[in-house]
Amino acid sequence: MNSPDMPADEKFRKGVNHLKGGLPSKASELISEAIAEGYDNSESRFYWFLAKLGKRSYRELGRDEKEELRHAQALLVDYPEDEWKQGIDVICSLLNRMEDPESDPEAELKALRELPDRQRVLIGEHLGMFLNGTLKDALWADMRDAAHRVAAEKERKDRVWAFFEPDPATPLAVYPELVSSSFSEKINLAFSTIAFAAAFGYLSWGVFSAGSLLPLFAFPLAMGGLYVGIRNAAEWEFRAGRLRRKEHEFAGVVSFPPSHDDNFSRRIVQFFDYYFYKYAPRDEAERKSWFADTRGVRRSLQNELIELYSNESVRPESVKWLARYLVRDVRKKWQEGVLFQYRERYWTPFKIKFQCCVGIFFALAGMSFVVQSAFEAEPVLSGLTTVALIISGGISVQLFLSIYLEKIRYDDDLENYAQEIANREKEYRRWKGKVEHAKPTDEQMERWLNADKTIFLDHALKEYKLAWRDIIAYTFLQSPSKTYRRARVSYGPWRYSRYSMLLFLITADGVREVGAELDFERSQLNGFERTNYRFDAVASVRVITSGDTPHSLELTLVNGEPRKIKVVDEDPALLETDSKDQERPEDLTNLTLESFGFDQALHVLEGIAAEGKQWIHRN
């Protein structure tokens, strides 16, 4: 996970980032390595103490850990007297005071309050569970007020959503089908056209040889009329075909692709349903018109995205931005009255129809004059030549229309594609920039989550009418709620938009358990539940694993049914790591469990289950 060649100062900075991200054990490992490799100063030692004591109570420290902390205190004389050394002195005084938690904390409080803001805030954020008794009582008002300020920050409301936004999928659009005309068709067109011209030329020459000047006028009249008629007929057919296709599409008769009955397709359909309802007008009459006018285009657009992205190995949420943009674009066109602009674009003007009819009329007239005159001069040979003229002409017209219609179809599709992909790429850049600008860091997410937990803790203390001097120990256990969005950064734990929170308050009378649902994006706690039980009521605590990964705790009370508390989502996607960052699935699992407070909750509950009330008297 870490390169052995990483400089000591870089290891230290990385350890600090892990600490700010709510991962003190990994932070302790990295900072200890940095100090051992020579990056030993008052700042690194200050963060080392925070990492060693972060998210832990004093009773969780083992004998070896306490001895390590005492040894570190003996080294403080080597550090210069600066704000970091001052912070370490306060931490050590707090640590030494844990042996007598009911003593007067005035000296430690005074020292803590005299610290520079940066060090004081860091101690309050990371040693909240370490402080206890009257000292915690004295600091609680400041910690609670600070938590409310942090939770209500406008920056949070404006930015949390961006953390859970997946990277937008690269914009795609339907690329036009390539021209389907084959080389053999073009060769056949050339030969049939030559045969047609030769037959008509032979008939004209026969008439001209007979002394008639009719071919001088009939030949160019027929050829010119044929060119104008066929070109305009092709344009007419193209426009009419495009118009039929668009009307068919907007009428809503395009069937949903039966081969895409999967989760990706269902999610795309849900996105379009949601946004078409979200952006619908409020006026009832306008809403009916909106849904009627957009029924077909909605289905067409959702089918398009399914076809474009179903084989691209992207999550449906990564395409959500494009669905939203397409619906907004439809709404804009509908409001401006240009949603059906294709009718004007592909409507066939009278000029084209007129030129088509007139051209064909003159072509037929010119050829009729020549054929009739040729029959009068040489009936048999002219009859055979006329048959060849009709056959080659029919083949030529058919092949010309097929090839030409394909060309103008492709040119039109290519123009539409270029415009559509340019618009989608523009929206992609805008949306990606907005998300990147708003996205908070993992450290900020942890800071806001800690503020919510402090507010939850304050609520529980008020509900039970408890003071901090009544709390022997406490622990949080958080897990994903039933519905949520999730996201993570490299080397960071999973973070969720909604959590199920459990708080265990250990007092001399037993265990107070408080549960609530946390809407992290809105910083709202709902659905509070309270449970009380004596120490001897906890019969057992069991860890349930999936493979080698712990994912649930099973808490069993005497005369009660076992209660399963899910901690980690069992979705296999949770173990997916970014190969370029060389992350390991087991590291990701441990990071998430640590951030959820799993180890600490297990330590407290197992201790109570094993020792009962005697646990609170054990140092």
Image: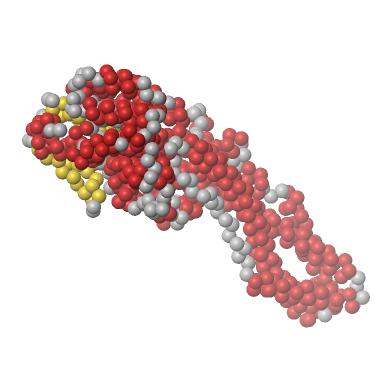
Q: Looking at the image, how many numbered discs can be counted on the residues? A: 0
Q: Nearer the viewer, residue 296 or 42?
A: 42
Residue 253, position in %: x, y?
49, 49
Residue drawn where x is 13% and y is 28% of the image:
510
Residue 262 lies left or right of residue 517; in this view the side is: right
Residue drawn where x is 64% and y is 73% of the image:
184
Position of 391 relative to 503 (above/below):
below
Residue drawn where x is 33% and y is 43% of the image:
32
Position of 349 relative to 197 (above/below):
above
Q: Nearer the viewer, residue 223 or 266?
A: 266
Q: Nearer the viewer, residue 269 or 434?
A: 434
Residue 263, position in %: x, y?
38, 50
Q: Nearer the viewer, residue 452 or 167?
A: 452
Position of 331 relative to 191 (above/below):
above
Residue drawn where x is 75% and y is 50% of the image:
351
Residue 390 visible somewhere in the drawing:
no
Extreme residue in the bottom direction: 380
Residue 126, position in %: x, y?
32, 32
Residue 162 lies left or right of residue 330; in this view the side is: left
Residue 2 lies left or right of residue 204; in this view the side is: left
